[in-house]
Image (tube, rainbow, N blue to C red):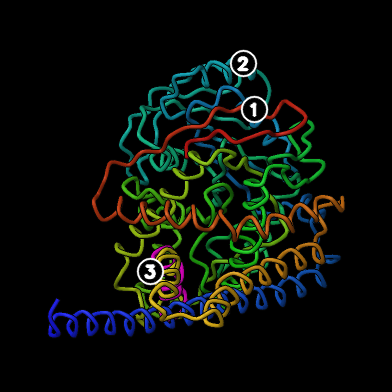
């Protein structure tokens, strides 16, 4: 090899060395920024939770339960192949502590006997029906059934298969009451969940248009008569990691965003909306795989674009109510779920991209949406890039041991500290885990979430982004369900 070639090769290695050094530094700064952002949200959430704990003795739930002024609610349960647990779920829903409400089950073309199970359990009779067309639907309503005897507030509609969003739209059209609560058919609600999630509407009826509640993981919990009577952390590492993730990102993160008026996501497993507002924006979007979050973003956009008189509105997150849902207990099922979530996020941000950084949309546009772009959408790409660039930097001498330790501290140890803070805040506020071994299990989940779990989810989320960009067919997948009749919930089984 001649001198010129050697010089060119050394120059190339030097340039590569410099590029990797810059990239590795950028990755460290990115992880410092994202973890600091989550820490700030946790601190905001702590302030909000402390304020609510002080007010808890004066919440007045019993007064609301007996008041004729408490707004009535239509609970909408879309169901697809839920025969194993649908009757127990509906019975539990009908026993919720709330003055006036109805339960609307929309069978989205199930093939496993879901409708037949409901018909037998509640003695349903088919009735003539005319379904209003307040929001558009795609799958035709085939039948409408009501209980034969007694004033049971239950409506069961069967429609052609059209997806969860379309089933929810049918429920919205059938709803008789001014508030609509959207829940999953495999969810378990605490007895006072409706009272708690409806309280913001009673406290601030002119401004509140939506509220969301906490979703907990039911895996490993003790269930009796359709209620979670003992909350436990799952024994398997995958379940423990998800418990920690839910506490940090879904419980405290959303509480923090709600505190500053930037809440973008209300989980489809448990959300309460003003029906007229949902109808005004056209209902759920059946073309978006993240239809629950997309509805919230569209409500923000609609209210901001209607002029100054509509800008004084609120979308809030309430920390007291709990909806328990089964989480995936297998990697392949979890992978499908996270691909779907990330794809939904990307579709939402692309659809509403004009809101990103736009002061017209307030803190939603200038703070929340940029945060989701930088720290939710881009996170898996940076995560996987860091895992490649750091070892490569070590091999090329661009990264020394001290630099590598700084990366581990910024990316993982910092994240573990935030997760530990999340567990401490939850235990301080609500103490849902009564056994020390459950708290210990959550601590183990902190380690598992950061070593192994994060890397897998980053890969799945990256694939979800590709699915959105390539417009791949939307595939939900499925999980086998065991239902709610057993003492403990072993694993989840809704469409994922």
Instruction: Tell me which segment is drawn in magenta.
Output: 366-381
Query: Which of the 4 quarters of the picture holds residue 298?
Result: bottom left
Task: Kindly identify the residue that appears in the image at 53 percent across and 58 percent down.
Answer: 454
Please tell me whether mark 3 or mark 1 is closer to you in this view: 1
Where is residue 183 drawn, in percent x and y? 57, 43
Say if 95 sits above or below 471 in the image: above
Q: Is residue 432 magenta?
A: no
Q: Which mark is residue 73?
A: none
Where is residue 252 drawn, in percent x and y? 65, 66
Q: Tag 1 or tag 2, which sits nearer the N-term?
A: 2
Closer-to-camera residue (342/289): 342
Where is residue 118 drawn, in percent x and y? 58, 21
Secondary structure under tag 3 reads: helix
| Residue pointed to by mark 2 | 123
- Find the distance from the CA under tag 3 to the CA under tag 1: 38 Å
The answer to whether mark 2 and mark 1 are in CB contact below 8 A is: no
Q: Judge from the rendering whether residue 301 lies leftward or rightward of residue 171; answer left or right.
A: left
Closer-to-camera residue (51/200): 51
Q: Judge from the rendering whether residue 167 lies leftward or rightward of residue 417; answer left or right.
A: left
| Residue pointed to by mark 3 | 301
Task: Kindly identify the residue that appears in the image at 64 percent across and 17 percent down.
Answer: 121
Quadrant location of the N terminus in the rendered image: bottom left
């Amino acid at each position: 090899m001649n001198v010129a070639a050697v010089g060119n090769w050394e120059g190339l290695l030097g340039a590569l060395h410099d590029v990797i050094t810059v990239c590795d530094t950028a990755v460290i700064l990115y992880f410092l920024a994202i973890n600091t952002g989550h820490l700030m949200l946790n601190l905001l959430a702590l302030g909000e939770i402390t304020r609510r704990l002080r007010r808890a003795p004066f919440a007045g739930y019993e007064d609301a339960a007996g008041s004729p002024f408490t707004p009535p609610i239509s609970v909408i349960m879309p169901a697809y192949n839920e025969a194993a647990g649908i009757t127990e779920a509906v019975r539990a829903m009908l026993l919720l502590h709330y003055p006036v409400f109805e339960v609307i089950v929309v069978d989205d073309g199930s093939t496993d006997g879901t409708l037949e199970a409901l018909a037998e359990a509640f003695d349903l009779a088919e009735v003539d029906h005319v379904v209003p067309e307040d929001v558009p639907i795609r799958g035709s309503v085939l039948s409408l059934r009501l209980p034969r005897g007694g004033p049971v507030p239950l409506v069961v509609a069967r429609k052609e298969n059209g997806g969860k969003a379309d089933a929810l739209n049918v429920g919205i059209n059938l709803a008789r009451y001014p508030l609509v609560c959207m829940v999953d058919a495999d969810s378990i609600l605490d007895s006072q969940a409706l009272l708690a999630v409806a309280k913001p509407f009673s406290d601030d009826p002119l401004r509140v248009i939506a509220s969301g509640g906490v979703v907990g993981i039911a895996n490993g919990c003790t269930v009796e008569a359709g209620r979670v009577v003992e909350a436990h952390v799952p024994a398997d590492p995958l379940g423990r990691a998800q418990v920690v993730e839910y506490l940090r990102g879904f419980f405290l993160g959303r509480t923090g965003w709600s505190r500053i008026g930037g809440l973008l996501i209300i989980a489809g497993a448990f959300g309460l909306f003003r029906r007229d507002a949902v109808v005004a924006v056209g209902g759920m979007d059946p073309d978006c795989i993240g239809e629950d979050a997309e509805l919230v973003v569209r409500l923000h956009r609609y209210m901001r674009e209607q002029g100054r008189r509509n800008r004084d509105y609120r979308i809030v997150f309430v920390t007291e109510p709990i909806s328990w849902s089964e989480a995936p207990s297998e990697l392949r099922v979890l992978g499908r779920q996270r691909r779907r979530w990330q794809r939904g996020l990307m579709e939402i941000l692309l659809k509403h991209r004009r809101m990103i950084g736009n002061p017209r949309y307030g803190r939603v546009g200038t703070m929340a949406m940029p945060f989701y772009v930088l720290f939710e959408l881009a996170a898996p790409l940076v995560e996987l890039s860091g895992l490649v660039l750091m070892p490569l930097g070590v091999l090329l001498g661009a990264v020394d041991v001290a630099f590598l330790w700084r990366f581990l501290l910024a990316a993982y140890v910092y994240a573990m500290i935030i997760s530990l803070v999340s567990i401490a805040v939850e235990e301080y506020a609500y103490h849902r885990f009564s056994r020390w071994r459950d708290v210990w299990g959550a601590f183990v989940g902190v380690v598992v979430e950061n070593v192994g779990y994060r890397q897998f989810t980053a890969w799945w989320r990256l694939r979800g982004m590709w699915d959105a960009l390539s417009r791949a067919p939307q595939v939900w997948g499925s999980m086998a369900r065991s239902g709610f009749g057993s003492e403990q919930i072993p694993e989840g089984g809704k469409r994922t």
